[in-house]
Amino acid sequence: MPSRPGVTVGVHLLPMECRPNCGMCCIAPSINLPLPGMSQGKPAGVACVNLEPDSLACRIWGSDQYPALCRGFEASPEVCGSSRQEAEAIIRWLEQETCPLDEKCET
């Protein structure tokens, strides 16, 4: 199994509070489900249109429009690392590791 950047594989870490001014969970991953304002989802590395550019906070968080997919995400050191840069590296790695063999995934 390839090692994941920034964390030790096989160690389960508890959920954490979202890091202020990060937003990597709304930028780095591809999302193939419709999102408010993005009916086709979004490619990896593209910011969700609902992400505030200055604060990197979600405009629709907590509203009825907030997607179930996003509600189900829990920040954790396993995905978020210890910095915004680590979060980006880990999520990019996860994108590559979960890319179907018959597709070319951009990260």
Image (cartoon, grey):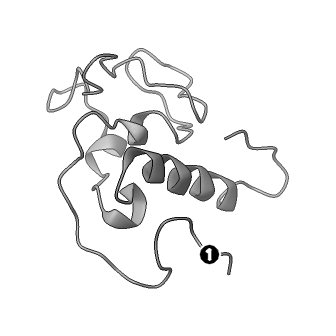
Reading the image, the residue beneath label 1 is 3
**10 Å neighbourhood of mark 1: few (<14), some, or many (≥20)?**
few
- Give the image location of residue 67, x and y in percent: 31, 35
Task: State the residue in front, 45 or 72.
Answer: 45
Q: Is residue 31 left or right of residue 59?
A: right
50 to 89, vertically: above or below: above
102 to 68, vertically: above or below: below
Amino acid type, mark 1: Ser
Residue drawn at 34 percent across, 20 percent down: 50
Q: Is residue 63 left or right of residue 13?
A: left
Task: State the residue in front, 62 or 15.
Answer: 15
Residue drawn at 46 percent across, 54 percent down: 86
- Give the image location of residue 72, x and y in percent: 29, 52
87 to 16, vertically: above or below: above
- Give the image location of residue 36, x and y in percent: 37, 20
- Give the image location of residue 61, x and y in percent: 20, 30
Helix, strand or loop at mark 1? loop
